[in-house]
Amino acid sequence: MNEQCLGIDWGTKRIGLSLGNAETKLASPLGVVDSLDALLEMAKKEKIERLVIGMPIHAHGQDRPDNGPFEAFVEALEARSGLPLTRIDERFSSQAADKLGANTKRDGQRDAIAAMIILQSYFDSL
């Protein structure tokens, strides 16, 4: 299984992205984008075959009641990309990114590292 995968840390202001390959099972931060169009452009450029998105979930394991914007984004992403999409529990990915030294929110580094953690969690589950 040699799939090129794009990890996604969705946010209302920024979308963190990471890149990885299912054969090597290693994820690395790619950067941030600010729209679905930019995400789709990046997926095309990187020849992505699978999308892996972090699901916003409360710490106690239930969906957040305000997940409407996230669900709308996921529906649009699936419809427009035509790619298989896997959802991964993203609880604590931002805190883990902070522990890796990405404690600044302004430049998006934290979002890209959180996306890397999401994608690595997917690889670890394979």
Image: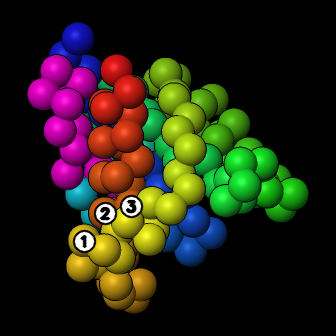
For the residues bearing labels 1 and 2, Cβ distance under 8 angstroms: yes
Q: Quadrant of the C terminus?
A: top left
Decide which of tag 3 and tag 1 comes sooner along the chain: 1
Q: Are marks 2 and 3 in contact (CB under 8 Å)?
A: yes
Q: Residue at x 23, y 11 (%)?
A: 1
Callout 1, which amino acid? Leu
Q: Main secondary structure of the magenta part?
A: strand
| Residue at numbered disc 1 | 100
- Give x and y (percent) for residue 59: 67, 59
Give the residue at the far right of this rendering: 65
Mark 2 sits on what residue?
Answer: 113
- Asked whether, in this view, residue 89 is left or right of residue 18, the answer is right
C-alpha gap between disc 2 and disc 3: 4 Å
Which residue has dot 3 on it? Answer: 114
In the foreground, 78 or 63: 63
Q: Amino acid at mark 2?
A: Ile
Q: Which residues are magenta?
A: 16-28
Distance between the Cα atoms at labels 1 and 2? 8 Å
